[in-house]
Image: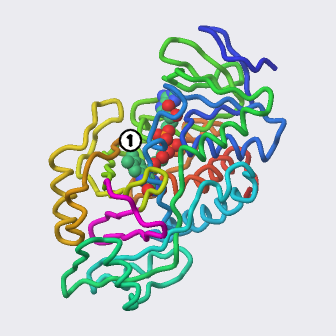
Amino acid sequence: MPDTTSGAGVASHYDLAVVGAGVVGALTAYYAVRQDPARRVLVITHAARGTGATRLSAGFDTPTGHNPAQRELAARSTALFDKLATELTDLPDAGRQPVDVYWLLGRDNIAALDATMADGGTTSSVEPQQRRMLEEAFPGLAHGGDEVLLASAPMTAGQPQLLADHLLDEVLSTPGNTLLEGFRVASIGRTGGHIELVATDGSRVTTDKAVVAPGPWALDGPVADAARERGARVKKVVAFHIMATPPPHAPALIFEDADAFLLPHHPGGHWIFSITSPDWDRGPDEPLAIDARDRDLAVTLLERHVPGFVPHLLGGRVLGDCFTPGRLPVVDTVGDDDVVMAIGGSGSGYRLAPAMAEDALDLLYRRTRI
Ligand SMILES: Cc1cc2nc3c(=O)[nH]c(=O)nc-3n(C[C@H](O)[C@H](O)[C@H](O)COP(=O)(O)OP(=O)(O)OC[C@H]3O[C@@H](n4cnc5c(N)ncnc54)[C@H](O)[C@@H]3O)c2cc1C
């Protein structure tokens, strides 16, 4: 079985092609090889390795969900991350660090927040000593009388690109597995009993099965129609940087009602301030920028709650992500039982990626859990 990349019009054959080298694609390829080391896997990216939402992700894993299906995905992903941590000996804890988590929200919303916890846990009141620590970490910390600060169990901050790179390296360390860069899949069809992936330049490769994990490109590529039918849209995701050094054990602070959070980013030596940008239907190939509207949102929230961070609000990271109804990823076959799409990270695609990858392979190979 040839394992090289193909030239125009020349087909190489693989057992599994994974379109997408982000965290969802990398996990899919990794699990596929782990399930069956003899399986020949081709990973495809339309640009260079490391192009996509995964590179820019804040990597915050809050095992929560606003509906039972999301909570199931979150809990399963946590278990799979824990398993990865034992498997990836070169990447301790799968690149995840525990982080203490505090929540700021309206008093009336406490029960709703507790119901989101995937492990069934609940939040608790902040003790005076914790309050003092929070006031040190978040300069000028303030909230209204109808709002409350709560503590929850620690969660984790990961390094999604580092993880994806490790997983891909593992996959590519097996001879016969290939990474194909700059191969933009335009269509996927069945020919001569095989699945054929055709690139925009007419190059083609064949495979027995395919998983399409295109992240924010879901509406441009081979699963675009199916993604649209499932209600997928692309939204700009913005995370500002607060250019101040977080203390060594700095906690995260989640503004639950604003769908925003402050997360210490120790590798970068600054904080990440993720907000919910209202910019819908902006494709990842468009020039995307953090704009004045995003900044106004960020400044307004900080002025209310952490005014001491406003002068340090400088730059950040921005890209689209694919959002699906109910923010529930869609992992399903597309037009053929041997082709599965895994889309709809909905701003949480890192933390839900392990379960998405597992579900994609379950659909293709009808196996029990990894
Ligand atoms: C600024 C920002 C902050 C975020 N913070 C968090 C967070 O804290 N926690 C969290 O859980 N999530 C977060 N997210 C969301 C998360 O990063 C994404 O949902 C996740 O990375 C998506 O992974 P993916 O593998 O599906 O897509 P990507 O990482 O975007 O990868 C897509 C891959 O598909 C390839 N591709 C696409 N179309 C084609 C095609 N036609 N042919 C060939 N290749 C193709 C691309 O080349 C790329 O390799 C954040 C996102 C952003 C932008």
Which quadrant does the N terminus fall into?
top right
Residue 185: image x %, image y %? 52, 24
Q: Secondary structure at mark 1?
A: helix
Q: Is residue 329 visible?
A: no
The region drawn magenta spans 243-263
Residue 174: image x %, image y %? 79, 33
Q: Is residue 262 visible?
A: yes
Q: Which residue is mark 1?
A: 228
**Left or right placement of residue 57 versus residue 352 in this view:** left
Query: Which residue ends up furthest to the right in the rendered image?
Result: 38
Please tell me which residue is depicted at 54% across the width and 40% down the height of the picture: 22
- Asked if 175 appears above or below 98 in the picture, the reply is above
Residue 224: image x %, image y %? 42, 34
The answer to if 261 sits in the magenta stretch is yes
Amino acid of disc 1: Arg
Q: Relative to the observer, which residue lies in front, 279 or 292? A: 292
**Left or right placement of residue 57 versus residue 96 in this view:** left
The answer to if 225 sits in the magenta stretch is no
Please tell me which residue is depicted at 16% across the width and 49% down the height of the picture: 293
Instruction: Check disc 1: other Cα within 10 Å, few if <14, some if 14-19, many if 20+.
Output: few
